[in-house]
Image (tube, rainbow, N blue to C red):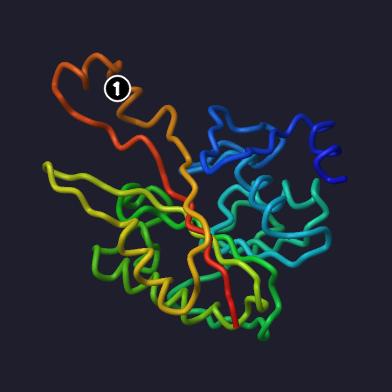
Amino acid sequence: MEISSLKIFDIRICENSVWDFKICDKRFGFRYPGRLPGQIYANFYYYFSGKNDMILDLFAGSGTSIDVGKLMTRNVIGYDLNPSRKDIIQFDILKDPNRFPKNYFQAIFCDPPYYNMNYKLYSNKKTDLANLNLNDFLKSMELIDLKFNRSIKKNGYFAIIISNKRKNSKLFDLEFKINEIFSKHLTLVHKIIVPYYNTKYQKLWNKNHFITNKFLLIGHRTLFVFQKKY
């Protein structure tokens, strides 16, 4: 059983909808802005794919998804606007066409910039999603849906992880918008909470600073898992 082999590699599979990992496993990827713990990919692959399945990561970053895929015998293709290593394919979400046929992937994973939280941190390119205004960012999400929906197999999955944003006491409910966009063509089957650790704000002040100032940090991201039913 796959679960037994994962235990040998000391990878914990979560039994509920809170995937709580404080530390990024050093075996997967490397230090990179917005890096997800490899354990998140491992759980996603375990629950929503099988061995030798084709999986596409639209924002591969440091290649964490690819490294986990090799361990779990998944065929992971990694795209990124600014490839950090040779096994990641350069791809511009806003400009480049989807070259994959219908019903090709068992799953697509999408960890985009969370609107402009990392403005110009990845690049200065105009097509870098982290550099877009809110309206254009949401349009880019609609474009992703239209471009890649057809390449998911029937009963396959599309996953996207996103976080809300607060500015000047105003909350941008990106999670609501993401659900609204992708629910047009896909069926939402899971919402998984992925807690934050060591955000830039937490590094600046200790928790008493936020309690004293009555400021609630946004402490999690949400991983939406949609299924293609047709």
Residue 189 vs residue 88: left or right? left
Residue 226 in the image, given as x and y percentages of width and height: 52, 65
Question: Would you say 53 lies left or right of 147 here?
Answer: right
The secondary element bearing badge 1 is classed as: helix
Q: Is residue 218 left or right of residue 87?
A: left
| Figure disc tally | 1
Above/below status of 186 relative to 160:
below
Which percent across, then down, holds residue 203? 35, 23
Please report the residue visible at 30 percent of the width from the left and 49 percent of the height from the top: 164
Direction from residue 216 to residue 196 in the image, left or right: right
- Residue at image location 59% in from the left, 77% down from the top: 229
What residue is at 48 percent from the left and 65 percent from the top? 188
Q: Quadrant of the N terminus?
A: top right
Give the position of the C terminus as an image quadrant: bottom right
Which residue is pictured at 46% across the width and 43% down the height? 193
Give residue 137's quadrant in the image.
bottom left
Residue 49 picture location, percent across and down: 72, 60
Dot 1: few (<14), some (14–19), or many (≥20) neighbours within 10 Å?
A: few
- Vertical placement of residue 68 versus 186, above or below: above
Task: Say if 73 sits above or below 142 in the image.
Answer: above
Nearer-the-camera pick, 97 or 126: 97
In x, y percent, where is residue 168? Answer: 11, 43
Look at label 1 and name its amino acid: Leu
What residue is shown with label 1?
Answer: 204
